[in-house]
Amino acid sequence: MLNKKNLKKYLLEHNLTEDVQKCEVEELSGGIINRIFRAKTEKGVFVLKQFLDKAKIDKNIRLSPKRFFYEKYAINYLDRILDKKITPPIVFFDDKNKIICMKDLGVNNRLDNLMLSNRLKPDVFSKIGKVLAEIHNKSFFNDSLSLLFDNEEFQELKFDYRYYRTMKYSSLIYARDELIQNCRKNKITFIHNDLKINNFFVLDNNKFCLIDYEGSYYGDPAFEVGYLLGHLFVYYFNQPNLRNKKIVLNFWNNYIYSLNFKHKRKLEENVVKHIGFIMIYKLVGISKDDFKFVQSEIKDKIISVSKRIILNKKVKKVNSIFNFLEQAF
């Protein structure tokens, strides 16, 4: 197991340094099921991710050792099917120790930091929407991918934490169970499965990079898209300005327009419900610290709006969610 004491020796053994005395290492706080380190050497700045067998948040949860390979397979798969690379700059995969080493992308380039600092151009979300649609289009109804990314155990863990453990509102239970049942049925395309804001980095020329593929799965695109939009709508509800609205619309409009799928209407209905649940989860769930910038008064309003989105059967369009903002705020 990597730690700050043995990491320098590991860097030396893997030709990332020739002088351990010149190495600077730190353990990063990100990740609840992995250990992540940043190492600065005379050869560059690197991030090393080691996969844990037990979750930091609950030692009773046993994690599949195959997560490392799901991430490795996903990166290789996307590098093969996409014309423009969006995966992180990998230095090496250490299969024996289940460690991935990549070049550091810079915390200031992380999407959540860019959004909060107002340094982000909304146009990058047009690219994200188009690329996500391209991934889904190229992966639809592929039996070999379904077998390769059969990450069922980890997927159920995501359902548990996002939709069950934090869901304390009895009025939403039926809608939740129906939505998750649909997810389990609609295993039709490759999904990254963790499209949260801080897994994106925006680099030069508005190019983006997406990290953290260990949850990769052959699953429901509505689950994938609703998760990212849930994040984006929290930012919008917290600060309802034109820029944040354009971020949502740029992503969604480019995704749904580029998607080659005949059941778009039903997909969008499910996306809307996922958005409601994810907004609640992001404000009261295990990763609520990511949104501690949201004031408690606004948080209560967002949760109230989320419940209405979930329970109102007439709300079937992503763009209609903006109307709830006007009523609530």
Image: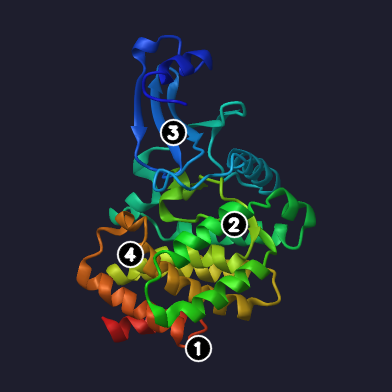
| Pointers 3 and 4 in contact (C-beta within 8 Å) | no
Q: Quadrant of the C terminus?
A: bottom left
Position in image of residue 21 (x %, y %): 35, 10
Disc 2 residue type?
Val
| Pointers 2 and 1 in contact (C-beta within 8 Å) | no
- Distance of mark 3 from mark 4, alpha carbons? 29 Å
Disc 4 residue type?
Leu
Q: Secondary structure at mark 4?
A: helix
Label 3 vs 4, first from the N-terminus: 3
Residue 131, numbered label: 2
Label 1 vs 4, first from the N-terminus: 4
Q: Residues within 10 Å of mark 1 (few under 14, many from 20)?
A: few
Position in image of residue 67 (x %, y %): 59, 42
At 39% from the left edge and 57% from the top edge, which residue is drawn?
A: 121
- Distance of mark 4 from mark 2, alpha carbons? 28 Å
At 45% from the left edge and 14% from the top edge, which residue is drawn?
A: 9
Q: Residues within 10 Å of mark 2 (few under 14, many from 20)?
A: many
Q: Secondary structure at mark 2?
A: helix
Q: Which residue is mark 3?
A: 104
Q: Which residue is mark 1?
A: 313
**Foreground label between 3 and 4:** 4
